[in-house]
Image (tube, rainbow, N blue to C red):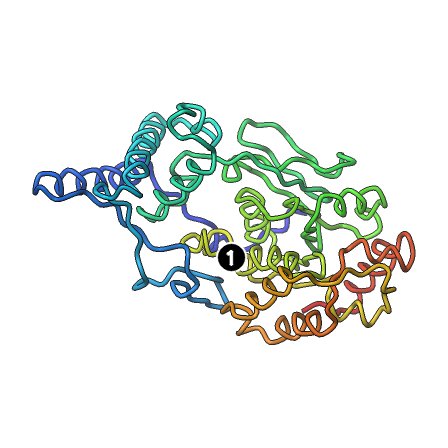
Amino acid sequence: MNIQGTKRDRAERISASQVMLLLEGVIKDVVRMISKNEPPVLSMASRTSWDNIRYTEGVGVQLKKDGKTSSIRFNSLTSVNKFALTLKVISIIYKLVQTDSYCTKRDLYYQDPHLFTNQAVVDDIVDNVSCMIQVPRWDLHVLATSKGCVAGDLKYTEADMNYVDCSLSPSGVMIPMDIFGIKNLRSDAKAIFVIEKDATFQRLLDDNVTRKISPCIYITGKGFPDVNTRLMLKRLWDEFKIPIFGLVDADPHGIEILSIYKFGSKALSFEAHNLTVPAIKWLGVLPSDIQRLNVPNSALIPLTKPDVDKARDLLRRPYILQNPVWKQEIDIMLRMGLKAEIQCLASISMNFLSEVYLPNKVRYGGWI
């Protein structure tokens, strides 16, 4: 059965002509400033401060419409180089859109590696251009190389007409770069599991979790999720509208990773409505689970000062402030002074995660 859900939340594509007009507008503004003997400036919403972010339960973190802006100035020694590189990237993007061509961020960097100096420069500029004209990166025809994997009860056809059956791969299927090109998604899945780490994802597949807890879909971003993994999860939610459960380490970094899927990230807050899936539930490993299951101390790790700083930073974020049950779990972790990886459950029994923990959590609840 093809489980279909409403499509009203799906990301809207922006036409090539609209994108080109917006890019032309940026260049016209630069020319206008030069014609008035004014040093040209490129301005965009600031993506570096939580003060510029608002949180709404149905969407996640978003840039404030009247928030602070940042600028890249031609007459500043600290930003003149970035100004020039930004115009270079805009010219490349314009040609890509005009010719209906696509490239990866890596391809873009290798068009002139000596000029860009490193990949991070290109990544930041592409996101700045996207934020500047309020157009998603995928509509700028710049794709990111996927690193995530998906497994379980899911079938679809890729943009190049390649048919994919995720249930046939023993180690999962790489998430495609063109999420919007996927067609004919089909599944009988009753739930989706988002797994933080590839090691846990592979261990679950080795334990035949796709048969033990079935029919379900399993997806991992292999740590901090890339945009394509987030887009894929959002696409699955838009299509099937089935429960989604997150399984992450009981530490500040695991909590932050799940927060990116559920609430969004500061850096891409201008695209929250296309990337966040607020319906995700935190299945585990909860800090309270450590106490409830009497996980041996030998399987736990003391919190470091950076861990404590990260946890306290999380407690100040708007989405945690408005989710008291999440705050309570972080408080429990800080009081214990301990953190735990998902693998700590193996200290109870080797297959405890796949045979006891996950099935019982799904059957009896215990998520937040």
17 shown above or below 55: above
Name the outermost residue toward the right: 349
Between 183 and 2, the residue placed more toward the observer is: 183
Badge 1 crowding class, 10 Å Cα cut-off, few under 14, some 14 to 19, many 20 or more, is many
What quarter of the picture does the C terminus occupy? bottom right
Q: Which residue is drawn at 70% across and 38% down?
A: 166
Q: In this view, does 319 lie to the left or right of 215?
A: left
Q: Which residue is drawn at 63% across and 45% down?
A: 221
246 shown above or below 135: below
102 shown above or below 361: above
Rendered location of residue 87, percent (x, y):
28, 34
Q: What's under tag 1, amino acid-wise?
A: Gly
Rendered location of residue 35, percent (x, y):
8, 39
Tag 1 residue: 264
Between 1 and 62, the residue placed more toward the observer is: 62
Q: In this view, does 24 lie to the left or right of 210?
A: left
User: Which quadrant of the view contains residue 260?
Assistant: bottom right
Q: In this view, does 256 lie to the left or right of 346?
A: left
Q: Total marks drawn? A: 1
Q: Which residue is drawn at 58% across and 35% down?
A: 176
Between 268 and 237, the residue placed more toward the observer is: 268
Rendered location of residue 19, percent (x, y):
31, 39
Rendered location of residue 302, percent (x, y):
75, 62
Which structural element holds mark 1?
Answer: loop
Q: In this view, does 206 lie to the left or right of 1?
A: right
